[in-house]
Amino acid sequence: MDLFPLYNSLRVASISTFVTFFAGICAAHYIARAPRAVKGVLDCVLTLPMVLPPTVVGFFLLKTIGPYGPVGSVVLDLWGFRLIMAWYSAIFATTIVTFPLMYRTVRGAFESFDRTLLYSGQTLGLSGTFIFWRITLPNCKQGILAGTVLSFARALGEFGATTMVTGYIPGRTATISTAVYQFWREGNDSLAYKWVAINLAISFLVLTTVNMLENRYDKPKHARAAPADTQ
Amino acid sequence: MSLYVKIKKTYTDFTLEAEFEAQNETMALLGASGCGKSLTLRCIAGIVRPDEGLIVSNGVTLFDSRKGINLSPQRRRVGLLFQNYALFPNMTVEGNIKAVLSKHGGRKNLHERFGRLARNFYFEGLENHYPSQLSGGQQQRVALARIMASDPSLLMLDEPLSALDSYLRWQLEDELARTLEGFPGDALYVSHNRAEARRLCDRVCVIDHGRFERARPTDELFESPETLASALLSGCKNYSRACRLTDGTVRAADWNLDLECSKTAPSGISHIGVRAHYISIVPADAETADGHGAANSFRCSVLKVTEDVFSTIVNVCPLGADPARDFSRIRAELPKGAAGAVKEGDVVLAVIRPDDIMPLRANVPIPASAKCDTI
């Protein structure tokens, strides 16, 4: 059995999770403190990929990074390679689809973060950078980890947008989810079952991890009574 | 060492107008919850930006809306002790304090300076504990030490004792008193607890719905509160709407009584207040015992007798007053045994010394209908 789809899926999911990890934290950090109107609009735009059908995301991607799209054509002219129908094309698709998961989970963590910790850091003379890296992030750790694991899981299972921009080329662009589809179409049920089993195992592992993280997040180890925030 | 604050901050349903001055002292900001005490501290610390005004601490302008000055919290040198102490939960005691120490004074002698704080604030041996592993008292000591590590010129304590149970409170109050005594700068102590303010502070500023009253020495507030809000905060329990009849007499409308009052009633009085333990109850047939005649003695019916821990509480209503009205009930707190065999339904004689009647004015203008003849 050719394990390339497993390898490719893990590779694509890892890279796109790496990207959404930073992008999601940055977006959450900025939007959690943005004025209400800005927050509403940006929140809608950034969450959109979560509710849109993946085929719509794939369609937009094809129109943008395809050889005739505004981005794809420039890359093709300048460096001579295509952004679609390659293994890395899936990274664009999975990054966009998983971004809202990361962003929303982390934003929730930032918003439930006890702001008096931030204020006390400021009055004690600690810099904004120190407060963000050494106080805010560590205290939102569980939320950030949960968001990362969820994004990774979603990236592993992404099918719609991925298949539109990568197609199915055995040994080059095949992923677990596209492999299952392909083997079923070919009537190769025994192989399809094997990939389904692999998929189930990975999903189970991921969900167990998320549950463990979220339980810890609900009851943080260092929990204390919420402050009475008068005005 | 001085602090001058005059700020205004408006929200849709609340306006804070703070104005006070502190000079080498511990000043209490006393008020009911939601009156703007904590907000004032947050404005001084730079966490909340006032709409307009001026804040000057030890000659340094922290905020001036006219000149466009608004120093960041980091540059204000203001130590703020939060009600929940706000220790960083992801760092040990040592991490919490060293983070601040190395910011103020660098890494030189870091360990010695840390050791000195640990000794002064009695948390030696707890260096590697996380805040969640500390008791409330230990957390407070560490939080105070952390503030001292930042070398503040002004210390502000936001209800530091209100989250604790009563036994621990006493212990921590003593330690706070020690810290406040040893602190060279000014300190602001926010509380809704009058007794704490009286024990820990030199002067007190009463805040009523966002408005600051004149700052006064703490004992003066308890001897002769001037306004209804300060009388309430000083723990006075009996009030009646009132107006001045002559220099020495007032009419207590809710009690339907004319009373002698030896304190000069200011022209704008709206209420009188009498502390519960200054009211004596004698049997109705007895002549008034201490012989000051019939001054301010009146017949009442006993509504309820309650045994408290160290006293007996007798609720009465003057015979001429309507018990259904809000202010008509009078609460007398008598030492155990002094109430004798008084029981519900009895008619007794209540006596209030003219000295003990406190003329008060309301902060809000009284409606025109509330004149003597109509209330």
Image (cartoon, coloured by chain):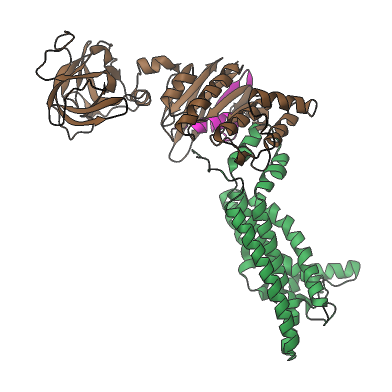
Question: Where is residue B257 drawn, in percent x and y?
Answer: 16, 21
Looking at the rendered structure, the number of numbered marks drawn on it comes to 0
Q: Is residue B277 left or right of residue A134?
A: left
Q: Residue A131, how many percent across, how many down?
A: 69, 40
Q: From the viewer's side, name the closer residue of B12 and B180.
A: B180
Q: In which quadrant of the rendered view does residue B335 lie? A: top left
- Residue drawn 56% across the image and 26% down it: B156
Relative horizontal placement of residue B3, taking residue A204 as reference (left or right): left
Asked whether residue A79 is drawn in magenta, I would say no
Residue at the outermost left position? B285
Query: As drawn, is B112 to the left or to the right of A229?
Result: right
Letter of the chain in green: A
Instruction: From the viewer's side, name the closer residue of B118 and B357.
Output: B118
Give the camera-side residue of A176 and A230: A176
Residue B11 showing in the rendered view: yes
Q: Is residue A53 above or below residue B372?
A: below
Check the rendered structure and report the hue given to chain B.
brown
Toward the top, the furthest residue is: B291
Report if residue A66 is visible in the image. no
Position of residue B259 measured from the top left corner of the image (x, y, whole percent): 19, 16
Quarter of the view holding residue B323: top left
Q: Picture coordinates of residue B278 (x, y %)?
A: 27, 18
Image quadrant holding the C terminus of chain B, namely top left
Whether the magenta-drawn stretch holds residue B44 is answered as yes
Q: Residue furthest bottom?
A: A187
Vertical comparison of A166 with A48: above or below: below
Q: Residue at x 71, y 75 (%)?
A: A199
Q: Which residues are magenta?
A: B35-60
- When the figure is inspected, residue B247 is found, relative to residue B112, above or below; the finding is above
Extreme residue in the right direction: A79
